[in-house]
Amino acid sequence: MKDNLDFGLKDKVAIVAGGGSNGNGIGNGRASSILLAEAGAKVLVVDLNKKSAQNTVDLIKNNGGDAFAIDADLTSSVECKNVVNEVMKKWKRLDILDNNIGIASNTSVVNENEKYWDKVMNVNLKPMFLMSKYSIPEMINSGNGGAIINISSISATRPKGYTSYSASKGAVISLTKAMAVDHGSEGIRVNCILPGPVYTPMVYQEGMSDKLREVRKDASLLNIEGNGYDIGRAVVYLCSNWARYITGQTLVVDGGCSLSYKSRGWN
């Protein structure tokens, strides 16, 4: 599905961190990769699982796009630097960074395991820090600034039983604002997307009943179910020339769930 709009992304170069997805599903990172490529960008898809990243690349290439895959542990400084070096080696520039990596939690601060708390913070925050650290200088050197998108969650502003996850996603918002302030004068725009209960492999990989899926859908004021492409479209917009005057902002993409009194079906 191609949107016939010129977003000014033709021949821009993007890194999508966490651009794979479980199986053939369409998660936020895979959807963003596909839509950025459809808008004309060249996309480096990064995932811990090389096959998953390659599956995304295959979908892009089958639709006439330009992409390649690399596997990396983005909690590692060395591997993050290598990812950026690879994109510069292939395309000689960098314009966009889309940070998608994250894992969930489902308990309170009293019941959370200390080791898992540390893991959530490490996975949900460190890759954004490291990928931005090495990407921003190359964006500046490329000559036209750049756009960074960090994926948070409405759990950051409306927490419900996912304490370590909510805390990490709240930190993503603060990181986004700090980066926007620090690098705005260098032409780097940094924004944050807060997805609601969209239907992606991350939430249904361990099974989801039709009843729970309906509860999640009903939580939307629009009474519709969101999916990865809804997040991907928001990513494309914020990376585009259409958002040239937008930085340091949080865009909620949840069908109105965060304004609803209804259960989101997360517990």
Image (tube, helix red, strand yellow):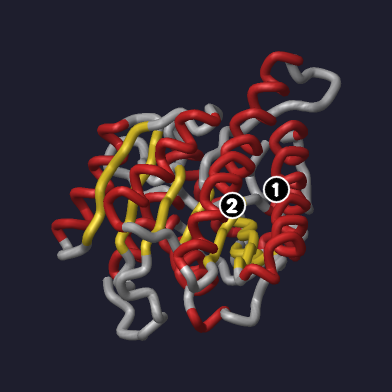
Residue 196, compared with residue 118, is above or below; it is below
Q: Position of residue 187 (x, y in %)?
A: 61, 71
Q: Nearer the viewer, residue 163 or 89?
A: 89
Give the residue displayed 54% in from the left and 57% down from the top. 217
Residue 92, compared with residue 8, is above or below; it is above
Q: According to the image, label 1 marks what residue?
A: 172
Q: According to the image, label 2 marks what residue?
A: 151
Helix, strand or loop status at disc 2: strand
Helix, strand or loop status at disc 1: helix
Residue 75, compared with residue 255, is above or below; it is above
Give the residue displayed 56% in from the left and 60% down from the top. 148
Q: Position of residue 137 (x, y in %)?
A: 55, 54
Residues packed near mark 1 inside 10 Å, few (<14), some (14 to 19) or many (20 plus): many
Q: Amino acid at mark 1?
A: Val
Residues packed near mark 2 inside 10 Å, few (<14), some (14 to 19) or many (20 plus): many
Q: Identify the mark nearer the N-term, 1 or 2.
A: 2
Q: Position of residue 245 (x, y in %)?
A: 64, 81
| Quarter in which the C terminus is drawn | top right
Q: Nearer the viewer, residue 185 or 124?
A: 185
